[in-house]
Image (spheres, rainbow, N blue to C red):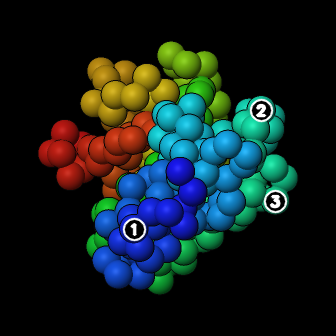
């Protein structure tokens, strides 16, 4: 079915203008970016196929260039646009956290971390370094592990915190399994890093755990 044969309120662009972006499905939003489909498949059908293949928008935006090249109908220009949208989202959230205390907008913090590392297929341990007003100074991915474990060295975290002259930090890592409940190892690591950084008068404010579709703040959950 061609888009022009659909009722106006079912076409992504008209639907967005009439009801707002939140009214659109993931596939419809993606269709707006793609703009055109391919022979025998309109843009909404193509978008739905792409979303399904990558397990959602987050999976698509974090997919490697090689993986996206395998999608018929997703050429270099469209792949570049998707990467640009992701980077704009990251920068917008980073700017928000540079201007306001990170813990003042916990949803932005969770969204930022999930966009950065949520869909990676391997574990990543990262740190947000904060100033005296809990505003973001820098974000760094410090350690990369396997699908099941990551080796994190407190000494390296401390050195980077001193490098940035951080007053406090937020720890972050992803769970490629999709579950974000903190494990015993996560609790142990948090305690270890809190103790190590406390010797330098650097406070650990939170530990965020993310997956492609979920995020958890150990502070907000009362388990920090």
For disc 1, the neighbor class at 10 Å (few under 14, some 14 to 19, many from 20) is few
Element under label 2?
Answer: loop
Q: Quickly name the residue at label 1.
A: 7
Q: CA distance from mark 1 to mark 3?
A: 29 Å
Q: Give the mark toward the camera: 1 or 3.
A: 1
Residue behind mark 2: 70
Label 3, secondary structure: give it: helix
In the rendered image, the residue lying farthest to the left is: 222
* 70, 107: nearer the viewer: 70
User: Which labelled disc corresponds to residue 77?
Assistant: 3
Q: Is residue 179 visible?
A: yes
Counting residues from the start of the chain, the first of labels 2 and 1 encountered is 1
Query: Residue at position x 34%, y 51% from top?
Result: 206
Question: From mark 2 to mark 1, how far is it between C-alphas?
Answer: 32 Å
Q: Is residue 202 shown above or below 216?
A: below
Pick the front one: 134 or 124: 124
Q: Are discs 1 and 3 less than 8 Å apart at CB?
A: no
Give the foreground label among 2 and 1.
1
| Residue at 28% from the left image edge and 30% from the top image edge | 181
Q: How many marks?
A: 3
Farthest residue in the front direction?
5
**Circles 2 and 3 in contact, beta carbons < 8 Å:** no
Q: Residues within 10 Å of mark 2 (few under 14, many from 20)?
A: few
Q: Secondary structure at mark 1?
A: loop
Kindly report the distance in space between the C-alpha atoms of the residues bearing marks 2 and 3: 14 Å
Q: Image quarter for residue 188? A: top left
Q: Name the residue at 49% across, 27% down.
A: 176
């Amino acid at each position: 079915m061609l888009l022009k044969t659909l009722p106006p309120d079912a076409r992504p662009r008209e639907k967005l203008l009439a009801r707002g972006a939140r009214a659109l499905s993931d596939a419809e939003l993606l269709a707006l970016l793609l703009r055109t489909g391919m022979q025998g498949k309109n843009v909404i059908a193509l978008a739905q196929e792409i979303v399904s293949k990558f397990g959602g928008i987050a999976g698509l935006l974090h997919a490697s260039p090689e993986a996206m090249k395998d999608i018929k109908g997703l050429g270099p220009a469209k792949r570049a646009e998707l990467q640009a949208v992701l980077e704009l989202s990251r920068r917008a959230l980073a700017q928000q956290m540079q201007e306001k205390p990170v813990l003042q907008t916990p949803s932005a913090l969770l969204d930022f971390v999930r966009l950065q590392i949520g869909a990676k297929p391997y574990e990543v341990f990262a740190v947000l370094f904060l100033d005296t007003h809990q505003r973001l100074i820098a974000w760094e991915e410090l350690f990369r592990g396997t699908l099941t474990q990551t080796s994190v060295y407190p000494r390296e975290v401390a050195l980077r915190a001193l490098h940035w002259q951080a007053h406090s930090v937020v720890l972050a890592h992803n769970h490629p399994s999709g579950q974000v409940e903190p494990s015993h190892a996560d609790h142990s690591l948090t305690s270890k890093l809190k103790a190590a950084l406390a010797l330098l008068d650097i406070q650990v404010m939170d530990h965020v755990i993310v997956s492609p579709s979920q995020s958890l703040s150990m502070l907000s959950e009362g388990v920090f």
